[in-house]
Image (tube, grey):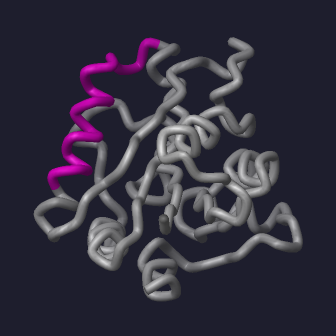
Amino acid sequence: MKLLILDRDGVINYDSDAYIKTLEEWVPIPGSIEAIAQLSKAGWTVAVATNQSGIARGYYPLDTLHAMHARLRELVAAQGGEVGLIVYCPHGPDEGCDCRKPKPGMLRTIAEHYQVPLQGIWFVGDSSGDLQAALAVGAQPVLVKTGKGERTLAKGVADNTLIFDDLAAIASQLI
């Protein structure tokens, strides 16, 4: 199985320090939907692992998060592709869960779902927490320069981190 795991905010859609709280605020980064569809059509399973502490903070309800993910699936399907498993952490940063990145719980959930080891699987993110989660399970950390990616890169990343401009560049590399 060819599995690619993506963070959501800053990788697939624009991010905001004020959180993405409504379906209207969930806006795909140019080329990201097409990239997911192309990967899917080329035999890749594209899963998503996303921290969504805005739920714990009361910024938006679970229904809104599900609507955002339904929109993502619809847009990718309209391009002939498919989105695999989407897992999210609804907890706040102080709740001590093991799913919130940089902890690797969501990555393990995806691996269990697909019955694959995480060793070498690409996990694409835009933050140091994403990269740390990948390293914690032996996955390949991949940084995109979209979202918080440029800021993350400026702070320094592990030597084995792969760096791309955006999700479209990753799709071109993998396909």
Q: Position of residue 50 (x, y in %)?
A: 51, 40
Residue at the (51%, 56%) spot, across then down: 6
Q: Is residue 153 above or below residue 8?
A: below
Residue at the (29%, 66%) spot, across then down: 33
Using residue 16 as the reference point, say whether residue 142 is left or right of it: right
Residue at the (42%, 78%) spot, across then down: 168
Using residue 68 as the reference point, say whether residue 8 is left or right of it: right
Q: Position of residue 162 (x, y in %)?
A: 71, 75
Q: Is residue 41 above or below residue 103?
A: below
Q: Quadrant of residue 34?
A: bottom left
Residue range in magenta is: 58-74
Q: Is 60 within the magenta?
A: yes
Q: Main secondary structure of the magenta part?
A: helix
Q: Position of residue 17 (x, y in %)?
A: 54, 40
Instruction: Pick the quarter of the image with the C terminus.
Output: bottom left
Using residue 146 as the reference point, say whether residue 60 is left or right of it: left
Q: Is residue 159 above or below residue 64?
A: below
Most extreme residue toward the left is 78
Number of disc labels: 0
Using residue 126 as the reference point, say whether residue 65 is left or right of it: left
Q: Nearer the viewer, residue 30 or 45?
A: 45
Q: Position of residue 143 (x, y in %)?
A: 65, 67
Q: Is 160 within the magenta?
A: no
Most extreme residue toward the front is 115
Residue at the (88%, 73%) spot, across then down: 159
